[in-house]
Image (cartoon, rainbow, N blue to C red):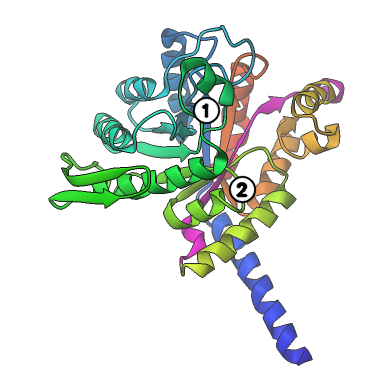
Amino acid sequence: MKCILSAVLIVLVSVTVCSATQQADKPIRFGLQVAQQQTTVQELKAVWQEAEALGFDTLWTNDHLLPSFGPPDKVNLEAWTLLAAMAGVTSRVRIGTMVSSNTFRHPSVLAKMATTVDHLSQGRLILGVGFGWFEREHAAFGVPFPKIRERSQRLDEALQLITALWSADPTASFSGTYYSLVDAPFEPKPVQQPHPPILIGGIGEKRTLPLVARYASMWNIPMLSPDRIREKSRVLERLCQDIQRDCTEIERSILTPVYIRTDPAEVHTLLERIAELRNIPVEQARKTVLAGTPEEIRHQIQTYIDVGVTHFIINLRRPGLYDRDGVRIFAKEIMPGFKEQ
């Protein structure tokens, strides 16, 4: 009996280690999320074009009707119309939403929008989706905001509906609790076949990760420490095993600010600000953001790679997280060493 238990333990450990190793063997990618608040269309275009020239692999909008942070009455631009503009002023970088709120658009409309942007970008779209979380903006604009259980069920149905439309031959039908299709034709199909990659953001073990296991080719993780990411990855691996899916097909990404500073006191001050905003200890904040000298940040990135993260998305946002000089240093001094591995 002892031998059997030991063998089982070895197998379980091997699965986890193998998964992280296989993820780390994938190319390391870098992205930039430019939050479209307290900015202008002209400035956004300049940032997107510079990010592509600097070698970033992906570019992202967020999807909010109000600024997600800071004064609610400041400028905030819409995500999907900006994606269409991004397609026209870039040529290589992949573009997407981080993440599109399923509460804002009927999934049939979203499928059409996503397909259109895939054509405008010549096959560079990533469809990032989520439940929606910012209740204040829903109340402000009269958008229904159901309880989390219903929002997760709606997203599940939305993903079924969108993928059904993308593969309609010649039409698609779907009957769900919240959405339906009746012999719906869908042309043109996306440029990317069988369809654009789907990214799902979040870490909830009961509702989000099961959807990641079933539908996503990319998983985005908010600011978590490497140890916590390892724990969440184990949950995702078990969910994938339950449906007989190879979990290594799913790319792990994180969304994080970057603070490149040579003065430790300045780094500590920045971390204190983050800790206060998130209501967490400073040491916890230190483990969840990229902050320090270029060498320290290289080490931090490697600790994430060691737990299977292969896509690092830097958050650029006003107020407080808008450091284009830091992004330039990151691109020139840090990214090349990992992309050449």
The dot on residue 33 is 1
Asked which secondary structure carries label 1, the reply is: strand
- The kind of residue tagged 2 is Gly
Which mark sits nearer the N-terminus, 1 or 2? 1
Query: Could you tell me residue 88's position as x and y percent?
Result: 30, 22
Residue 219 belongs to magenta span: no
Residue 251 belongs to magenta span: yes
Q: Which residues are magenta?
A: 245-266
Asked which secondary structure carries label 2, the reply is: loop
Name the residue nearer the viewer: 142 or 54. 142
- Separation of disc 1 and disc 2 at Cα? 22 Å
Residue 37 appears left or right of 111: right
Name the residue nearer the viewer: 55 or 174. 174
Residue 220 appears left or right of 44: right
Residue 77 position (above or below residue 334): above
Residue at left offset 20%, top offset 43%? 189
Residue 308 position (above or below residue 154): below
Badge 2 density bin: few <14, some 14–19, many ≥20, Cα 10 Å:
few
Q: Which residue is mark 2?
A: 204
Query: Could you tell me residue 65's position as x and y percent?
Result: 48, 19
Please identify, in this view, whether the residue under mark 1 or under mark 2 is nearer the observer: 2
Query: Could you tell me residue 147's position as x and y percent?
Result: 55, 38
For the N terminus, the quadrant is: bottom right
Badge 1 density bin: few <14, some 14–19, many ≥20, Cα 10 Å:
many
Q: Is residue 193 visible?
A: no
Mark 1 vs 2: CB contact within 8 A? no
**In which quadrant of the rendered view does residue 285 lie?**
top right
The dot on residue 22 is none
